[in-house]
Amino acid sequence: MIEGMTALYIFMLAAVAGYEIIGRVPVILHTPLMSGSNFVHGIVLVGAMVAMGHAHTTLELVVGFIGVALAAGNAVGGYVVTERMLEMFKSSKGSN
Amino acid sequence: MHNIIQISYFIAAFLFIFGLKRMSSPLTARDGIIWAGVGMLVASLITFFEPGMENYLLMTTAIFVGGVAAFWSGKKVAMTDMPQMIALYNGMGGGAAGAIAAVELLKGDFHSQTFLTLAVLGALIGSISFSGSMVAFAKLQGLIRRPMRFPGQQLFNIAVFLVAAGFGAVLVIQGEFTGSIILIFFAAALAYGMFMALPIGGADMPVVISLFNALTGLAVAFEGFVLNNAAMIIAGTVVGSAGTLLTQLMARAMNRSIGNVLFSSFGASGGAEESVEGSMKPIDAVDAGVMMAFAERVIIIPGYGMAVAQAQHKIFELMEMLLARGVDVKFAIHPVAGRMPGHMNVLLAEANVPYDRLYDLDEINAAFLQTDVALVIGANDVVNPSARTNPDSPIYGMPILNADQAKNVIVIKRGQGKGFSGVENALFFGDNTRMLYGDGQAMVGELIEAVKEF
C-alpha cells in the first residue's frame, strides 16, 4: 500500500521530474510534447481496466466499460498523433 | 505474480519519464514516443494478470472499440487538424479518470477518508477536463462557431462549480452515498467544464487544451492513489506538472496570463472596434513575383491560412527557386502561428523546409528593417502592428512579427476578412503593403511561375 508520507514523496518527486523535463524546451516542440504528455496520461487505461475488472453490478460494469473504451482511445489516439507529428522531424536532419 | 506486476509498472513509469525527456529535444524526439509506447504496452498487458479480475471479454471489447476508433481517426486526420485531436484524446483520458472514480464510488468501499477525498477530487478534475476538452474539440473542428457569452457568466460559472464542489464535499463527509448524489455531482462537474470552455475564443484554445491536459494528468494521479497504482501516480503527476509549465510557456508566448485567457476574452470589452485609415492596395502575382526575384532578402511569414490552403509544398518550391537565384530566404515563425506553438514548424518540416531557415520571433524581428520583401501567407493577427502601437486594440501588447518594417510587404489572402481575433489589421493598409488576393496554394504557384520567367 502506498500511503501517507510515501505517497506525498512520490507526488513531489514526480512533479519535480515533470517540471525539469519541460524546463528548457524549444518552442517547436511545444505541440509534440503536449501531444506526448497527452499520450502518457493514457496510463489511465490500467486503472480503468482494474476498476472494470472488479465491477459487480450492471451499472458498475457499464461505467467501467465506458471508462476502458475512453482510456484506450486516449492511449492509442495519443500515440498515433504524437508519432505522426514527430515523424516530421526526420527530414530536418540532413543539414545540421 | 504480484512482484512481476509491480516491477512492470515501475519499468513503465521509468519509460514514460525517459520517453518524455527524449521528446524534449528535436534530435531524439522521434524515439521518445516509441520508448513511452513500450512503457504503455508493458503496463497495459501486465494489468490483465492483476489478481481477482473478471469481465475479461467485455474489457477486451472496450479496449478494441476505443482503440480502433482512436487509431482510425488519428491516422486519417490531416496535419492541420492535429490540435483538436489532442483535445479529443485528452478529454477521453479525463473521462476515463472520472469513470474510474464513479465505479469506485458505486462500490463504496474505501480504505480511508483520504482515498475517498482523492477519488472525488480526481472525479471533479477529470470530468471538467472531459467536457471542457470536448468543447475545445468542437470549437476547433468548427462545430461551435463563436464564443458563447452572456451577462453574469462568471458568477453563473462560479455557482455551477460550487454545486459540483459542494456535492463532492457531501460525498466525502457522508462517506456513504446514494446514486442521486453521485449523479448530481458528476452532472455539475461536467457542466462546469463545458461552461468554462464555451466563452473562450478559438485563438486561445491551445492554452486551454494544454491546461486540460495538465488537469487530466492530475486526475489520473489522484485515481492512481485510490487504486494504489504507482505507474498511474507517477505518469499522471509528471504530466500534471509538465503540462502546467507548458501551459505557462504558451500563455507567455502570447503575452497573456493564464487567468487572462480563462476569464476574459478577445473582443469581450466591446466598442474596441477600431477603424484603420487608408485602403488596401492589390497587386497581381506577376508583379509580386518579380519583386521577390530581384530582392536580396526575403522573409516568409506563414500562418494558419497557409496550412488550410496546403500551400507549404509550394512555398518550399518557391524557396528553392529564390535560393537558386541567390536571394536570401528566411522563415519567421510566430510562437502562436497556426493553432498551436510549433504547428508551423511541423508543417514546413513536412514540406522539407530545413530547420535552419526557420527563425523565432526574437531572432528575426531586427532583420525586417533590412528586408526587401516580407511575404505574409495566411497570417493575420501575428503581424498586426496595432499590437505595438494602439493601446486600445484588444491584441495590444501581444508580441508580433514586425513585417511592417520591411521595405515591401506582400500579403496573400483569400478575401478582405479579419483575423481570428476579429480585429482589423493595420498592416494591410500600410503604404508599403500590397495585397495578393486568392487561394494560398494557387497564388504561390503563380509566384513560382513569375519567378521562373525572369
Image (cartoon, coloured by chain):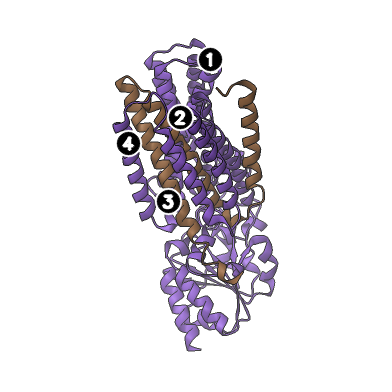
Measured in 3D between alpha carbons, the distance from the residue under mark 2 to the one under mark 4, in whole angstroms, is: 21 Å
Tags 2 and 4 on a common chain: yes
* Horizontal and vertical percent position of residue B417: 46, 60
Question: Tag 1: Cα neighbours inside 10 Å, few (<14), some, or many (≥20)?
Answer: few
Q: Distance between the residues labelled 3 and 2?
A: 31 Å
Mark 1 / mark 2, whichever is N-terminal: 2
Q: Are marks 4 and 1 on the same chain?
A: yes
Q: Is disc 2 on the same chain as disc 1? A: yes
Q: Name the residue under label 1.
A: B112
Tell me the colour chain B is drawn in. purple
| Residue B435 drawn above or below residue B308 | below
Q: Which chain carries label 1?
A: B
Instruction: Residue type at mark 4: give it.
Output: Thr
Label 4 is found on which chain of the structure?
B
Mark 2, Cα crowd under 10 Å, few <14 / some 14-19 / many 20+, is few
C-alpha span from label 1 to label 2 = 26 Å
Residue B82: % across, % down: 44, 53
From the viewer's perspective, is the residue at label 2 or at label 4 nearer?
A: 2
Q: Tell me the residue that label 2 is attached to.
A: B1
Q: List the residue tagged with mark 3.
A: A80
Q: The chain coloured brown carries which letter?
A: A
Q: Is B90 above or below relative to B384?
A: above
Residue bearing mark 4: B60
Residue plotted at (37% across, 46% down):
B70
Subunit bearing disc 3: A
